[in-house]
Image (tube, coloured by chain):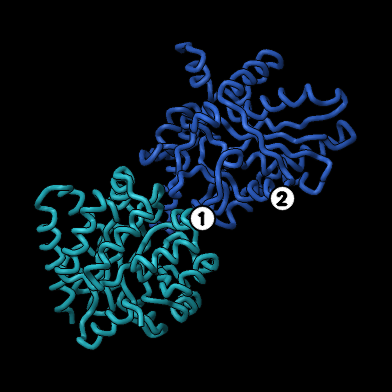
Amino acid sequence: MGTEDIRRQSMNVFRMKLLGAKVHGVTSGTATLKDAMNDALRHWVTHVRDTFYVIGTVAGPHPYPQMVRDFQSVIGREAREQMLEAVGCLPDAAVACVGGGSNAMGLFYPFVEDKAVRLIGVEASGLGIASGKHAASISAGSVGVLHGNKTYLLQDGDGQIQHAHSISAGLDYPGVGPEHAHLHDIGRAEYAAISDDEALAAFKMLTEMEGIIPALESSHAIAEVIKMAPQMNKDQIILVCLSGRGDKDMHTVAEAMGIEL
Amino acid sequence: MSRIAETMNALKQKRTKALVPFLTAGDPDLATTEALIHVLVESGADIIELGIPFSDPMADGPTIQLASERALAAGTTLKGVLELVARVRRRTNVPIVLMGYYNPVLCYGTTAFAADAAAAGVDGVLLVDLPPEEAQELQPHLRRNGLDLITLLAPTTPPERMRALAGAAEGYLYYVSMTGVTGSQQVNPAAIADAVRDIQAHCQVPVAVGFGITTPVDAKAVAGFADAVVVGSALVNIIAAAGRSPELLNEVRAFMTALSEGVRTAE
């Protein structure tokens, strides 16, 4: 895990350690997910005879994107079933945040053949696309090859990978799973971008109004729903994936609000 | 005949093996790399592997990761690397193989890259994250321009895949001496000799061995069975330590001369 992410996700890291994990800090590059993936791949090739590589997102060489999609799609299958049970019809739109894109792919996949359901992935535009400090690979990147997959990447004119930025560690990756790139290219899914500030505002709104504290990642999806809902009819339905809890983000949110804990 | 084949044939007739140094282009800057390449050739290099710096060198250990960072910090681009090769080519016939990752090549454009690399005087290309199965968007352009796409084999490559890749190999085959990243541990020549001989029995091109060869003793031992010996991180460490100091060229010359002595006296 990148040392920057260890700092930002200290609550989760503590939990991982309580569960018995040994967490190796990665200091190379930007010390975030991209660099942790580089070092995990390096460790894997060095210890390939007795080590299995696993990854939590739908990126990397085949068959990892497919494996992670299939595991994650439990959420989409259950959401689809429950929607039919509780409401009696499919939603008009399904919305999820996209970094590497695992929770979004898990939500979208069981709906891909339901053409009437809009699929909306929400990337992080960080400090704004124009600032260059963002993680919106589909919205503002270009096609390249990294970590064994061809997809949309944040890169400069020489094919060097650029630093991603997002207030949420889980979206802070300069690429996106290749199946999202495909869904975008064939026009099946749409991809929007939400800034750090918009995500923070959504975080506060959901916390105050529903008593549900969303992860900063999921707050990007909530922010998009807040934008979309007023454009829709009252009887239309939006399904949003609350992919994580915000407990882990208390330090980051407090810091952004200028509060010392 | 390509420069790689000519060089390897000439060495075979002399019953000697090839010494193949690797260095990262632009570390610490392209002018120094240019001077270094001439020193390498004068002190016994038969083929030069020139690294294209990349922001995310997944197959490399810390030594070459840092070399890549220094080269990128100095503003090195693929275009600059090709211009360097063109300058070097005016003074030497040494075969030059560009080694690196696929994204800078893809970003440059596969058609333009193949044409520009050939025009600059590049002889082969080795891209560690472009498996043969995915090479079809690049390889036809390289072929049309007379460039070899060098293939890697690892100790974990299954026999049937080894035979397929060895049969289709161009230029030379690069056998990775261990499971690991560059510069991570010392090679064990005795442990890989049989694997290399097995590969040689299945291919028409020379077999080079790299990863973990750091001393003249290693080079001599590996040259006892391999057709070519690649030395990367050990050389890059010398370049890193000397930086732009006036001693750099002499230190590299001394190291290369010792490696060359090892390779030439292999039995």
Q: What element carries label 1?
A: loop
Is residue A230 toward the left or the right of residue B102 in the image? right
Q: Can residue B264 be seen in this view?
A: yes
Chain of the residue under label 1: A
Check disc 1 and give the amino acid type.
Gly
Is residue A133 toward the left or the right of residue B154 in the image? right
Q: Residue A20 carries which label?
A: none
Chain of the residue under label 2: A
Residue highlighted by disc 1: A148
Is residue A33 toward the left or the right of residue A218 in the image? left
Q: Residue A186 carries which label?
A: 2
**Looking at the image, which residue is at 51% across and 35% down?**
A172
Mark 2, other Cα within 10 Å: few <14 / some 14–19 / many ≥20: few
Residue in front for this viewpoint, B93 or B240: B93
In the displayed orientation, state which residue is furthest to the top. A259
**Looking at the image, which residue is at 44% across and 52% down?**
A41
Check disc 2 and give the amino acid type.
Ile
The relative height of residue B252 versus residue A199 in the rendered view (above or below) is: below
Q: Position of residue B81 (x, y in %)?
A: 33, 57
Tell me, by letter, which chain the rendering colours blue: A
Q: Is mark 2 on a helix, strand or loop?
A: loop
In the displayed orientation, state which residue is furthest to the bottom. B13
Q: Quadrant of the N terminus of chain A?
A: top left
Tell me, by letter, which chain the rendering colours cyan: B
